[in-house]
Image (cartoon, rainbow, N blue to C red):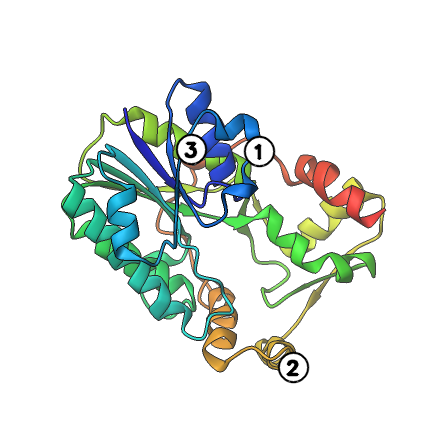
Amino acid sequence: MSIAVTAPTGQVGSRVVRLLVQAGVRPTLLLRDPDKLDPETRALVDVRVGDQRDTDYVLEATKGAHALFWLDTTPHVDDDPIGASARLGEVAASAVRANGIDHVVFLSSVGAERRHGAGHIDGLARIEESLDATGAAVAHLRCGYFFSNLLMSVDALREGVLPTTMPLDAPLPWVDPRDVGEVVAARLLAAGWSGREVQAVHGPEDLTHSRVAEVLTEATGREIAALHLSDDDVRGQLRGAGLPEAAVEGIVGMTAGTRDGFVPEQPRELRTTTPTTLGQWAWAHLRPLLG
C-alpha cells in the first residue's frame, strides 16, 4: 500500500504519519521543510520536498500512490483565502486523475455543507467539489471546532476571558486534532470503501462556550469566563492587525456561517464521536501555558 500525506508535520498530519508507520506502511510525505521531521521519523518515510500549490510537484510526488490524505494549507490570512483553497483543490484533483489514485481522504469542516456563506470554509467546499469530480473514492471528514484553536486566545485566557462571536449558549462540536488524525489514518488504511462519503468528526460532546469556560476553569485552575464579541468587534481587531479585507471576512464568516440555527448535516452518532475530552486536552496542553 502506497499512501501520500500532505501537511505531515501538523497537528493532524503528524498523528497520521505515526499511525501509518506503526501499521507497517512507509508513507510518502509532501512538505516544504524536511527539517521539521525528527530523524527517527525521517528514516521510516519517503520525503518529497516542494510547494503544495505547485501542480507539477504534486503530480510527481504522488506518482504510484494508492491513497492520498489532502489537507488545505491555505492560511486564513491569505489575500484571497477562498480562491487559494479552491486552487489547491484543483491541484489535488489533477494529481488524483493523472496518477489514478484510488482513495482520497480530505480534511474538511463542519459548515462545508453550506457551500456558500461560511467564510473560508467555503474554500473547503470548493475542494470537496473538485475531488468529487475525479471519480475516485473520496471521504470528506467534516470536523468540529479544534480544541487547539484555543491556543490562539492564550493571552486572553491568561486574563480570564474566553472571547467568541458565537452565542454563549449555542452548542457546537469540539474535537481533539489528535483524534482527527486517528480517523484519517483508519480511513486511509481501510481502502475497502468506494464512492463519495462524508463522515463528521464531532469529538465526544457538543459544548457551549459557557461550558467551555467552565471546563477550562476546572482544568487550569484559573477562573475563566466566556465573553461575547460582535462580528464588527472582531473585524476591527483583524483590520487593526493589518489583515486584508478578504481575510477578515473569511475569518469572521467561518463563525457567522455556523451559528444562528445552523445544524451540521451529519448527526452525532457512533462514527462521528471521538474520545478525548476538552478537559483532558486542556490539562495537558493549556494548563502549562497558563501557569
- Disc 1 element: loop
Q: On the rendered structure, is 205 left or right of 186? A: right
Discs 1, 3 touching: Cβ within 8 Å: no
**Hey, which quadrant is residue 60 in on the image?**
top left
Q: Position of residue 208 (x, y in %)?
A: 61, 53
Q: Which residue is mark 2?
A: 240
Q: Position of residue 193 (x, y in %)?
A: 22, 30
Q: Position of residue 104 (x, y in %)?
A: 27, 40
Local packing at callout 1 (Cα closer than 10 Å; few below 14, some 14-19, many 20+) is few
Question: Nearest the camera: 3 or 143?
Answer: 3
Residue depicted at x 70% and y 59%: 153
Q: Nearer the viewer, mark 2 or mark 1?
A: 1
Whichever of labels 1 and 3 marks the residue nearer the N terminus, that label is 1
- Disc 2 element: helix
Q: Give, as a three-letter code, the residue at label 2.
A: Gly
Local packing at callout 2 (Cα closer than 10 Å; few below 14, some 14-19, many 20+) is few
**Hey, which quadrant is residue 257 in on the image?**
bottom left
Q: Which residue is mark 1?
A: 38
Residue depicted at x 26% and y 56%: 55
Q: Give, as a three-letter code, the residue at label 1.
A: Asp
Q: Give, as a three-letter code, the residue at label 3.
A: Val
The answer to whether one can see residue 11 in this image is no
Whichever of labels 2 and 3 marks the residue nearer the N terminus, that label is 3
Q: Position of residue 103 (x, y in %)?
A: 24, 36
The answer to whether one can see residue 156 in this image is yes
Gap between marks 2 and 1, in whole Å?
37 Å
Q: On the rendered structure, is 236 left or right of 81? A: right
Vertical position of residue 224 compared to residue 248: above or below: above
**Hey, which quadrant is residue 198 in on the image?**
top left
Local packing at callout 3 (Cα closer than 10 Å; few below 14, some 14-19, many 20+) is many
Q: Which residue is mark 3?
A: 183
